Image: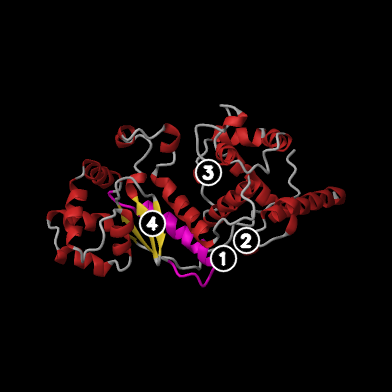
Amino acid sequence: MQRLFFYITIVCASACFMSSCNRNPLNVDVSDIDANVQVERFDREFYSCSDDVSFSTVGQLAEKYPFFFDMYNMHIISCGTYSDKAYYECLRVFFSDYSVIEAYSAVNKEFANCDDVQKTLNDGFRHLLYYYPDMELPRVVTFVAGFNQSIVLMDGYVGIGLEKYLGEKCPLYDMLQIPDFAKREMQRKRIPVDVMTEWFHDMHPYAPETDNLVNRMIYNGMAMYFVEAMFPDMPETDRLTYTDEELDYCRHFERDMWTSLIENNYLFTTDMFTIKKFAENAPFTAPFGQECPARVANWTGLQIVKSYVENNKVSFTELMEETDYQKILNLSEYNPK
């Protein structure tokens, strides 16, 4: 009986140790962190001006959304400033454009409310404050821009172009001849992921000494790790826009893909055409065949980053400050089985 008790004790202790060792370092407690950012429907308020395009109506919005209003008009819909006479004619043309009218109609149906988006974003912002407690949270505003912008970060604001997230079955996307692989990422559940991806890019711009594939892989892997840190409970399929089958493919052929990248001298290529084949969205990763999901180089970069963190006991913020991507590769000891 004593031997049995001793055996059970050892097994339980070992299990606890293994569980501790394998614990995801990104699963942190944010329950006591307050984040209550509201999604402000600038898109609706701005479109209400279409019935009365005048200095008084747009002036009220300019006061309510300082800085963003000017940036939206000048750089997103390219109508200039509301102090110019030509601005009002440009605005009338914008509101009468067929694609804009259809976009507003579709947005009103798909985004009758943004409660789910707001809830997920605030979960992300709580995690952001966990790692960066002095970070000032932005105002989050929605807009329509005629399908030319998704996420825009500007001083104190995150802008979300809702017409870029109407769902992959949206008829407007067929009308615009958007390819199927691109439509997969045009879903409302992508909004929080895209917001935090852009947040990472804004905090940590890509500026390597040499722009080659492996540097891109690791930088993009860091961006994916950043998003995972903001949304550790989000399904991996949603964070990466992969199906379960595509994730299984990546895991099953991880070693084969890594070996091919090395043996075919892809890792240090600076040829932009080749880099895009591996790292940018497409129907598949062409050099690996049509069965291989798109962007697998970025997925591999994420595995390198995770290996680097695990083998070097690097904190999240220390990782995010690292700009020597070659160092991350060398110290990662990445060697898929």
Q: Earlier in the sequence, mark 2 or mark 3?
A: 3
Secondary structure of the residue carrying numbered label 2: helix
Q: Are marks 1 and 2 in contact (CB under 8 Å)?
A: yes
Q: Are marks 2 and 3 in contact (CB under 8 Å)?
A: no
Task: Please provide the residue range marked out in magenta.
Answer: 112-137
Q: Residues within 10 Å of mark 4 (few under 14, many from 20)?
A: some
Q: According to the image, label 2 marks what residue?
A: 316
Residue at x-position 47% and y-position 55%: 198
- Residue 108 image position (x, y, % from top left): 25, 47
- Residue 133 image position (x, y, % from top left): 53, 71
Q: Residues within 10 Å of mark 3 (few under 14, many from 20)?
A: some
Is residue 57 visible to the viewer in this orientation of the structure?
Answer: yes
Q: According to the image, label 1 marks what residue?
A: 131
Q: According to the image, label 3 marks what residue?
A: 240
Label ID, residue 7: none
Q: What is the three-letter code of the residue carrying label 4? A: Gln
Q: Residues within 10 Å of mark 1 (few under 14, many from 20)?
A: some
Q: According to the image, label 4 marks what residue?
A: 118
